[in-house]
Image (cartoon, rainbow, N blue to C red):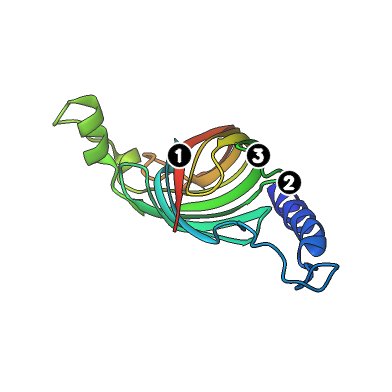
Amino acid sequence: MVGKLTAAVLLAATAAATPALADDATSVDGSAPAPSPGYPHVGIMGDLGVPDGATASLVVRPIRMLRVEGGISTDGAGPGWRGGATLIPFSWRVSPVIGVTRGHMYQRNANAFAQEVSGDAMFSSPLLDKVGYDYDAARVGIEFGQRDAVFYLHGGVTHVSGQIHGISGATNDPDVDVWTVSADLGVIFYL
């Protein structure tokens, strides 16, 4: 489902960009056109979300309606990465958006994080010895701002998949596939 949504977002952005790429270099009377304010093409993004944790990304806008991002994440227990695309259909100061992301959190020992969160320095679980997962998210949201800074709030659904390790007596580590809510709150600063 997320793969089909990604293809639809990219197809819509490409179709919408076609007229925008056909700008004339001169006006009807042959004089040079008035300067256009354009849009910023590169930026940095930071956000907090579920299940992606805290993420810092590089943002590229190849066309006004499409933003592509890729960066590093942490869920508090370890590192990961996230990439995605967002369709921005309108150039308004407050604008609706739709986007898709894919991310991965590397396997790591999450016991130290659980100890920090719980306040119990003695806590330890074999289920947390090897924690890692993949996720795909489809989100809609609203963004505030246009040029130098954009603040956003996105929400939607996420498919999380991984394995549970350390179950005593299990011959194989069971696979886990969960559909859950997804959200992120963040800011983009364009350069």
The quadrant holding residue 27 is: bottom right
Label located before the other in sequence (3 or 2): 2
Residue 71 in picture, x, y percent from top left: 44, 57
**Amino acid type, mark 1:** Gly
Residue bearing mark 2: 1
Crowd class of label 2 (few under 14; some 14 to 19; many from 20; radius 10 Å): few
Left or right of 9? Residue 166 is left
Instruction: State which quarter of the image contains the C terminus.
Output: bottom left
Q: Residue furthest left?
A: 121
Which residue is at the front of the view, 156 or 131? 156
For residue 5, side relative to residue 52 (left or right): right
Q: Position of residue 185 (x, y in %)?
A: 47, 35
Foreground: disc 3 or disc 2: 3
For residue 10, the mark is none
Dot 2 lies on which element? loop
Reading the image, the residue beneath label 3 is 92
Q: Mark 1 or mark 3: which is in front?
A: 3
Q: Position of residue 64 (x, y in %)?
A: 66, 56
- How many labels were placed on the picture? 3
In terms of image quadrants, where is residue 28? bottom right
Instruction: Name which residue lies at 52% across and 37% down.
Output: 152
Q: CA distance from mark 1 to mark 2?
A: 25 Å
Within-10-Å neighbours for mark 1: few <14, some 14–19, many 20+: some
Residue shown at 31% from the left, 41% from the top: 76
Q: Residue at x 36, y 39 (%)?
A: 168
Task: State the residue in front, 131 or 171.
Answer: 131
List the residue tagged with mark 1. Answer: 186
**Image spot of residue 72 (x, y percent):** 40, 56
User: In the image, what residue occupies the spot 71% across and 43% down?
Assistant: 90
Q: Amino acid at mark 2?
A: Met
Tag 3: amino acid? Trp
